[in-house]
Structure formats: structure tokens, C-alpha cells
């Protein structure tokens, strides 16, 4: 018997979603599996990231996030925003990271810029993968971007994640350029 497709509701994130958003961001940079028990050594990073997610003018703000829920449970999220806001939000976000941890991220390549709608971080709980939730979130944000007048959406995929790159290509994204961020090389994918 085929498992039934769950009813997924997409909604804007709230302050209360900050813990889940922080886990999504950490999953997006391969620091933590979305459903994993948080290791003690990452507790401080996680708590600081939650504070960043609760601010309205940071890269990983709840204001930039859409949540996918099933039966009232958050099962996935996508952080996305206007690339014209990136430089200012990056300065604040990376400044807070440096202040809290001493980690200087200022040498990261600029991930996005004006004229782009940027899909920053996305993750889906493992038990809910394969139901099209990621595609729902992507299509929701692309429709939003189009209504806002954007003609280009971008995202980054780690170069060693070919399966993930093919997933985005199936949604119409194509290779743009290579960027070095968070200590690794990424392919920047674009959709017009």
C-alpha cells in the first residue's frame, strides 16, 4: 500500500520558529542533520543562531522564512530574500557571529546581490522527504519573487552535492558560477 501524501500548509515564519530555522540553517551548511540530537559542543552556536533568527534584519531572520507544516508540525523551511538586502544583512549577521564566536566570515564571497531573489537555506525533515515539500517551498518563493518583479532567482549548492544540484536543475535552475563560501566551493545556480 502506497503511503498517503500528507496535507502540507505553507506559512510565514514567526518568532517562535527561530529554533527550527536555526536548525535549517545549520543543516544547510552541513553542520547538523535537521532531526539530529544537538551535540553539546554545538549548543552555544545553536543558541546564538536562534537569537539571529529572531531578529528582523539578519540573513536568517524569521521574516525571510517560509515554513512547511503537516498537522501543525514544522517539517521544512526555506529562507529566501531580496539580494539587494544581502550586503546590509550580511554585515550585521556576520558581525554578530564574529562578536560571539570570533569567527570571521568576511572573506566569504558575496552570495547574491541586487536584481536577484536569493534562496539561502532549505531543509526538510528526513521522514518527510520525497513528498515534494521542497519543491512546494521553492515554487512558493519563486511565485512570490515573480510577483515582486524579480526576473532572476539564485541559490548555492556545494560542488560535491551533485544529486542536490540535479534536484534544483529539475526546477529550472542552471549553472552560473563557482563561489567560495563557508570554507567550501559552491556552484551558484540561476533561474530566469
Image (spheres, helix red, strand yellow):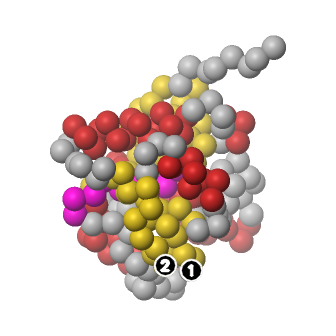
State yes or no: residue 18 in magenta.
no
Q: Is residue 131 above or below residue 112?
A: above
Residue 147 or residue 88, whichever sits in front: 147
Residue 192, position as x, y percentages in the image: 30, 50
Of tags 1 and 2, the one toward the viewer is 2
Instruction: Kindly identify the residue that appears in the image at 55 percent across and 34 percent down.
Output: 133
Residue that extends furthest to the top in the rendered view of this protein = 1
Q: Are marks 1 and 2 in contact (CB under 8 Å)?
A: yes
Using the image, tell me which numbered label, if any, was put on residue 180. Answer: 2
What is the chief secondary structure element of the magenta stretch? strand
> Disc 2 on helix, strand or loop?
strand
State yes or no: residue 120 in magenta.
yes
Residue 189, position as x, y percentages in the image: 43, 59
Instruction: Kindly identify the residue that appears in the image at 57 percent across and 66 percent down.
Output: 158
Residue 133 or residue 104, whichever sits in front: 133
Q: From the image, tell me which residue sits under label 1.
A: 183
Instruction: Kindly identify the residue that appears in the image at 33 percent across and 66 percent down.
Output: 112
**Can residue 85 be seen by looking at this rendering?**
no
For this view, does 82 lie left or right of residue 133? Answer: left
Q: Between marks 1 and 2, how big is the CA–CA gap?
A: 7 Å
Residue 170, position as x, y percentages in the image: 51, 43
Residue that extends furthest to the left in the rendered view of this protein = 149
The magenta region covers 114-122
Amino acid at each position: 500500500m502506497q503511503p498517503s501524501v500528507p496535507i502540507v500548509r505553507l506559512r510565514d515564519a514567526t518568532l517562535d520558529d527561530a529554533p527550527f530555522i536555526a536548525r535549517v540553517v545549520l543543516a544547510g551548511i552541513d553542520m547538523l542533520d535537521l532531526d539530529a540530537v544537538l551535540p553539546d559542543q554545538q549548543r552555544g552556536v545553536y543558541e546564538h543562531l536562534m537569537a539571529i533568527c529572531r531578529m528582523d534584519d539578519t540573513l536568517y531572520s524569521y521574516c525571510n522564512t517560509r515554513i512547511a507544516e503537516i498537522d501543525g508540525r514544522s517539517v521544512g523551511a526555506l529562507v529566501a530574500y531580496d539580494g539587494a538586502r544581502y550586503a546590509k544583512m550580511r554585515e550585521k549577521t556576520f558581525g554578530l557571529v564574529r562578536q560571539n564566536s570570533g569567527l570571521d566570515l568576511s572573506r566569504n564571497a558575496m552570495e547574491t546581490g541586487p536584481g536577484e531573489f536569493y534562496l539561502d537555506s532549505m531543509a526538510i525533515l528526513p521522514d518527510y522527504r520525497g513528498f515534494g515539500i521542497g519543491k512546494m517551498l521553492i515554487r512558493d518563493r519563486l511565485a512570490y519573487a515573480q510577483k515582486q518583479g524579480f526576473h532572476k532567482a539564485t541559490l548555492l549548492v556545494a560542488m560535491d552535492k551533485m544529486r542536490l544540484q540535479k534536484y534544483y536543475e529539475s526546477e529550472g535552475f542552471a549553472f552560473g558560477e563557482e563561489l567560495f563560501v563557508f570554507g567550501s566551493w559552491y556552484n551558484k545556480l540561476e533561474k530566469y
